Image: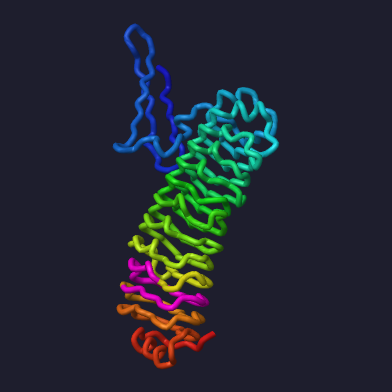
Amino acid sequence: MKSASTHRRGPILGLFATLAVLSAGAMGGCETDILIELDPPGESDDDGVTAASCDKLHQGDLNLSNAPPAGLVSLCGVTGNLTLSHPTNKDAAKQAKNIKLVQGNLIYADTYGQNAETLQKLQTVEGDVTIQGCITAGLSSLTSIGGNLVVTHNKCDLSGLNSLKRVNGNVQLNAKNAKLTSLERIDGDLNVSYLRDNTLTGLGNLKTIGKSLRLGGQLSSIAALSGLRSVGHHLVINGGKFTSLTALSGVTSWGASVKDFTVQVQNSHGLTKLDGLDGLTKVGRLTVQTNYNMKSMAIPNLTEVGHLKIRYNKLLASVSMPKVKVISSMYVCKNAMSAQQEAELYKKFGGDQQPCN
C-alpha cells in the first residue's frame, strides 16, 4: 500500500484544513489514492492562491531582469522575492505570465511600463509589495498582500490594483492617486504622505483600519473615507487643506485600547471646525493645536480623556464636549477664548491645569 501524504495550505489570509490523502487497496490488488479536500464551511480560495493550489514553485528569489530559469513558463509561484524592474529580460517577462503566488516580497519598479501585463495573473503576495514604478496595470488580479503595501513614486496610477481587497500590514502612499477601489481592510496603518490628485478618491470601500489612520500633506478632501467604520489605534492629522472631518462620522469603533489611543489634529489650516468625531467616546490623549483657521470644535459623545491639549488655535472660540471628564493633565491656552472661558473649561472638564508650553 502506498504511504499517505499531506498537502499544506499557504499561511496567508485564513488557513484551510489539512488535505488528507488516504491510500486504500482496490480489488484485484491494484492500489488507488483517494484525495479528500476539507475546506471549512463558507471558506473559499477567493482571497488568493496558496501553495496548496500552486504545485510548481520557483525555489528562491527571481529577478526578471535576468535570463529566465529553465521551466519558468510552467511555474505558478515563487518561494522567495520577485523583482520586476527596468530593463526587464524580454524572455523572462514573457515566461512569468503564469505566476499567481509570491511567498516573499514583490518589488515592482517597472517605471517605463513596458511590462504592464507580465504579472497579470498574480493573485497573492505573502510578503511586502513595494511599487517604485508608475504603471501598475499588471497587478490587476492581486487580491491579497500579507505584508505592507508601499508606493514611493508620485506618478503611480494605482487604478491597476482594482482587485486588492486586504493588506495585512501597513499601506503607505506617495502616488498619483489612491484608486484601490476594492480595498476593504488594512490590518496595519494607513499613511497618506502625498497624492498628486490631493484626494482619497478610490478608497470608498475601505471599512477597517487595524492600527492608525495618518493624513496630511496637501490633501484637499477626505470624503472618500465615508465608508470607514473602525480605526484601531491612532488618528493623526497633520496638515491638509480639507475643511471638515465629517467623512469620519461613520466610524463607530475608535481605539482597541483606550489607554494608548491618541487623536491628534494639528497644522490643519483648512479646518474651520473640528467635527465628524461623533463616534469617539474615550481617548487616551486628545491634542488639537496650531490649526489657525479652526473656530469651533465639537465632540458630543466624548466621555473620557486621559490627557487633553487645546492650544495655539488662534481663532478657536468655542469648545463643546458636554459629557467629557479629563482624568489627568489638561492644557487649554493661546486660543481665541478669554481667560474666563478657559477657567470655565478647566472647572467643567476637571483635569489638572498645566502651564501652557
Does the magenta portion include 278? yes
The extreme top residue here reads 28
| Left or right relative to 125: residue 45 | left
Q: How many marks?
A: 0
Q: Residue at x 42, y 83 (%)?
A: 317
**Quarter of the figure with the N terminus:** top left
Residue 249, position as x, y percentages in the image: 35, 63
Dividing the picture into quadrants, the one containing residue 353 is bottom left
Above or below: residue 171 compared with residue 19: below
Q: Residue at x 38, y 57 (%)?
A: 226
Question: Magenta segment range?
Answer: 275-300
Q: Residue at x 39, y 81 (%)?
A: 318
Residue 150, position as x, y percentages in the image: 56, 50
**Quarter of the figure with the C terminus:** bottom right
Name the foreground residue: 102 vs 347: 347
Does the magenta portion include 211? no
Q: How is the image coloured?
A: rainbow
Name the foreground residue: 335 vs 72: 335
Dividing the picture into quadrants, the one containing residue 228 is bottom left
Above or below: residue 340 compared with residue 327: below
Residue 194, position as x, y percentages in the image: 57, 58
Q: Residue at x 49, y 69 (%)?
A: 270
- Residue 290 seen from this side: yes
| Left or right relative to 153: residue 336 | left
Dividing the picture into quadrants, the one containing residue 235 is bottom left
Residue 153, position as x, y percentages in the image: 62, 50
| Left or right relative to 168: residue 118 | right
Name the foreground residue: 254 vs 203: 203
